[in-house]
Image (cartoon, rainbow, N blue to C red):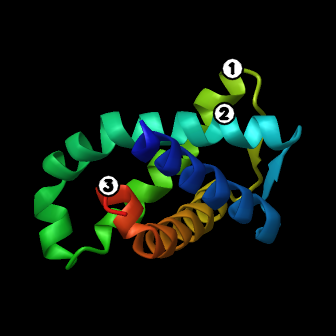
Amino acid sequence: MTKFILRWTINAVSLFLAVRFLDGIDLKGGIVNVIWLGFIFGLINALLRPLLKFLTFPLILLTLGLFTLVINTFLFWLTSVVGQSFGFDLLISNPVWWNAFLGGLVISVVSTVLSWLLKDELKGKN
């Protein structure tokens, strides 16, 4: 259960930093919206990322892994769409693809760094 909450927190912090530092991404509401969007983002990643990586494996291999950035862009955009349908307004301005790409990139970098810093807690070691 602690790993789940820690992963949820990492997603929420990553989303918050993407919203905070990128002009093309805006979030209406407060910290509660960030927390729920972190949950939605984690759920979308857990359900769709493995399938998308499996289906696009040849492209990932051909581009030496760079196609995963396109997958991250799509998952971030999808989080915005799903979040808006639940009333959590994560708004991506025009050009949507470029801003979603930058948002996905920020989220990937922050999540990777936080996961690396908290690797022992995520593995369950103390």
Please identify the quadrant where the C terminus is shown: bottom left
CA distance for labels 2 and 3: 24 Å
Contact, CB < 8 Å: mark 1 with mark 2?
A: yes
- Which residue lies most toward the top here? 86
Please identify the quadrant where the N terminus is shown: top left
Viewer-closest of 108 and 74: 108
Q: Find numbered disc 2 in the image and state the secondary structure of the residue it sits on.
A: helix
The number of discs equals 3
Residue 1 - label: none
Packing grade of label 2 (10 A; few <14, some 14-19, many >=20) is: some
Percent coordinates x, y for residue 22 in the rendering: 76, 68
Above or below: residue 116 compared with residue 9? below
Q: Earlier in the sequence, mark 2 or mark 3?
A: 2
Contact, CB < 8 Å: mark 3 with mark 1?
A: no
Q: Find numbered disc 1 in the image and state the secondary structure of the residue it sits on.
A: loop
Residue 86 - label: 1
Residue where numbered disc 2 is placed: 36
* Residue type, numbered disc 3: Gly
Percent coordinates x, y for residue 30 in the rendering: 88, 41
Packing grade of label 3 (10 A; few <14, some 14-19, many >=20) is: few
Residue where numbered disc 3 is placed: 124
Is label 2 or label 3 in front? Answer: 3
Is label 3 or label 1 in front? Answer: 3
CA distance for labels 3 and 1: 33 Å
